[in-house]
Image (cartoon, helix red, strand yellow):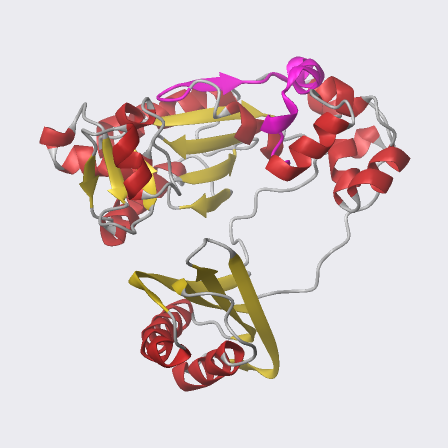
Amino acid sequence: MSNDLPIRKIIHVDMDAFYASVAQMDNPKLKGKPIAVGGGGTRGVISAASYEARQFGVKSAMSGRLAIKLCPELIFVRTDFARYTEISKKVRHIFYDYTDLVEPLSLDEAYLDVTENKKGNPSASLIAQEIRARIFNEVGLTASAGISINKFIAKVASDYNKPNGQKTVNPEEVLQFLEDLDIRKFYGVGKVTAEKMYQKGIFTGKDLKAKSLEYLDENFGKSGRYYYYIVRGIQNSEVKPNRIRKSLAAERTFSENLSSEIFMLEKLDHIAEEVAKRLAKSNVAGKTVTLKIKYSDFTLQTRSKTLPYFISDKSIILETAKDLLYQEKLNNSVRLLGISLSNLNTETSKVKTPKVKEKPVSVQLKFDF
């Protein structure tokens, strides 16, 4: 079965502190200073932080109030998604000079399959180095990269030598790399799962690899099989140039907590309008409307309703969101509302991945990187 494993050379490119770096590039006075994108005001939440700010412990998803306590000299700048999109397109244009197999994960990161590339260069490491140099010279920003035999390892590796660096995990190094890897660095292992693994004596990839498939299935459910194969270097996920969008959403954080559903209706109207605009722009529709509610104590609640037909019209989205809002009494005052549409008409039936017998990676470990 191991002879059927695909031979791939995958690069994961990740822009360094993208939003913050764009702000520093556009305003040279901000270079070398601790800045945070978003997070301004008494209730703002930070979208991104420069490396100078990160040294103080400032990070994304942190409240602006806490960030300024950690770094009194912190400078807040507004988000500018139009600008980020513009820069992202320039970076992707560089990617397509090397391969058409580009899978964007967000505005600031993407997978590239360069097994067969437009430059005829057999070295994925040299291609990554050249791409990073071009991004710096043509766009003015730095990027980091991870290079290996599959998407999982490439993504993990791209974080090793940040900022402005790269790491290659050569085929013959894969198994040892995974055994030495801290379990917290495994993509898909969140804080809760990591704590559970610690309790069971799993701290590294080597510890994880020592567990049987039956044990992992029993203790970690559907994810158990994923952990079992990924720690053995087995991942057959291809780089997908046209990633299927699974959902589309918009949300708003309010300057003051809202305590009555009546006050929330106007907010929902604006949010539904934004969702409808994004649906129209992407030319998609969906069946499942989800209302996201974040309370003043930061607890999160979602309420969903699936319709028997696809919708994209603002009025239907809004009416469904209203129904969900009144579905049950609110637990507390509300600081954020969001509406998302999923079960989109872009989704196709899922293809089951064939089971792979436990065997060492062989073919993937025999070609030059």
Pick whichever, 141 or 192, lies toward us: 192
Task: Return the x and y of residue 40 as percentages of the image width and height.
Answer: 23, 47
Q: Identify the image quadrant of the N terminus.
A: top right
Magenta-highlighted residues: 162-189
Between 349 and 99, the one lying in front of the other is: 349
Nearer-the-camera pick, 187 or 119? 187
Q: Is residue 165 on the magenta stretch?
A: yes
Residue 228, picture quadrant: top right
**Going 59% across and 34% down the picture, which residue do you hit?**
151
Q: Nearer the viewer, residue 263 or 343?
A: 263
- Residue 36 on image: x %, y %: 26, 37
Q: Which quadrant is home to the C terminus?
A: top right
Q: Residue furthest left?
A: 29
Q: Is residue 11 above or below residue 180?
A: below
Whether residue 182 is situated above or below residue 323 in the rendered picture: above
Residue occupying the point 38% across, 39% down: 60
Relative image position of residue 77 (x, y in whole percent): 19, 43
Relative to 299, does residue 114 appear above or below in the rendering? above
Residue that extends furthest to the right in the rendered view of this protein: 214
Residue 39 forms part of the magenta stretch: no
The residue at the point 49 percent across, 18 percent down is: 167
Residue at position x 49%, y 77% in the image: 325
Residue 197 image offset from top left, x and y in percent: 73, 30
Number of residue marks: 0
Residue 190 visible from this viewpoint: no
Q: In this rendering, would 42 be left or right of 178?
A: left
Q: Is residue 192 found left or right of 267 in the rendered image?
A: right
